Amino acid sequence: MNYRMIAYLSGVIILIEATFMLLPALVALIYGEASGWCFLITILAAGAAGFLLTLLRPKKRDMYAREGFVITALAWIVISLIGAAPFTMSGQIPSYLDAVFEMVSGFTTTGSSVVPNVEVLDRCMNFWRCLSHWLGGMGILVFMLAIVNLGGGQSNHLLRAESPGPTVSKMVPNMRKSAAILYSIYVGMTLLQIMLLLLGGMPLFDSLCHSFATAGTGGFGVKAASIGYYDSYYLQGVIAVFMVLFGVNFNAYYFLLMRKWRNALHITEVRTYFGIIAVSTLLITANITGLLGSVYDALHHAFFAVSSIMTTTGFATVDFNQWPGLSRLILVMLMIVGACAGSTGGGVKVSRMVIVFKTAAFEVRKLLHPASVKVLTVDGKRVSRETIQGVQSYLVVYFAITVISILLVSLDGYDLVTTVTAVEATLNNIGPGLEMVGPAGNYSMFSPLSKIVLTMDMLLGRLELFPLLIMLMPSTWRKH
């Protein structure tokens, strides 16, 4: 284990976070909010700690998969612990555990909140909540790789540990350039959404916060009624479309930029993703038309809800918890499926679902035709046995964590739907669930134990389970 490398990169990450915290401090200065001092104090303390850690420059820059998993898991825990400090110092979220829950929810782009009414928070606090979505969406380690040259192939382990999905491929041979391309696309799409929201009359502050939250598919907002506060189908439509766009595998955007139209249009995962959105929207529209009065209204709110849940963003225009059982069941299923691999969305990922169903069909054909020598392929490429086993292992661990989490959270004594959807909403990084944790509810009523369990679920979901589990294994830290 290269401990000095872990310490050095942790210091770099802390310095990056401290730098970004200057932005909410600036917001506090603009609006004359005294709580801005809490950010400045945190920046000074984090900056000093980060600087001291960067002095531990590793003599050997060797880094393997083990270090990559540990650095990734530690980084997400540390930035959440540091990012929570201003909330408690200012008294706006008095409980540090609640503040950590809120920040983990922010950085993991979950959007589950313990704040009953976000409108009572200072603007700088709300800005920091939404900015944490933007930082966590593409990944703070990806940002670090875009600006720091680690040399060799060291960065590959970090990118693979942090990026969502069963596989991560480089866009170009140099991993640092790949990270820079990802963030360039990410920044460009975010700026485009900000401009479109401004054109629709949304205030600049609200446009920034909602664009950060949409880009990271997070769901934190600045209004208690979420996007339903804005009585404009244009603004709601812009956010719905961008939620869908940020849930697409970013490799598709790279192909489009390189004018490789066929490569972009023939990605099975992306086509399946859009197909699921279309079918789900039509089914829910048919199911809620009588409730909302017109087909147009039903289609609009159905598309927004599907876009929000499928991409694990968590925004809401209406309280879908009040919809018929069929619509709610479809939304729960979408919670589990999630967005594409290589996007900012959470969930199991469409790519895994594609592999699972293709594997099942492949095994059935093999039973019918034992002498067949066909191989399993996706997008014309052979799917290796290692990839299939990796997907199967992920689903087994995912199911085990889900069951254990539900059992622990059920100790609070809330109804089954609240308990199950709270776990699913946090483990899949969605935000709202159903019943007490629906769009009109929050997570403040849970016990400290349940909040810790749900906080761990958010981290496990964002980091694809294994980095955090590997970091917690004692064998990981042994010398040999």
Image: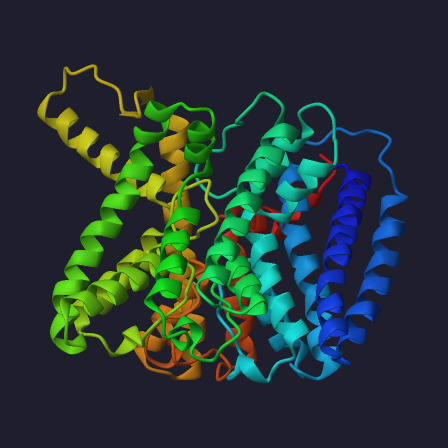
- Picture layout, residue 378 above or below residue 37: above
Is 54 rendered above or below residue 2?
below
| 114 in relation to 67, above or below | below
Task: Residue 325: name its quadrant.
Answer: bottom left
**Residue 218 appears in the picture as rendered:** no
Viewer-nearest residue: 5 or 32: 32
Q: Is residue 344 left or right of residue 35?
A: left
Residue in view at x 47 percent, y 31 percent: 254
Look at the image and tell me whether residue 143 can be seen. yes
| Residue 308, image x, y percentages | 36, 60
Q: In front here: 303 or 387?
A: 303
Question: Residue sitting at 59 percent across and 46 percent down?
Answer: 470
Which of the colour schemes (rainbow, by chain, secondary structure, one colour) is used? rainbow
Give x and y (percent) for residue 444: 51, 82
Residue at 74% from the left image edge and 36% from the top image edge: 148
Q: Is residue 222 left or right of residue 30?
A: left
* Residue at x 37%, y 47% (from the top left corner): 395
Residue 297 location, x and y as percent? 21, 69
Q: How many marks?
A: 0
Q: Position of residue 214 (x, y in %)?
A: 47, 58
Q: Is residue 416 left or right of residue 78?
A: left
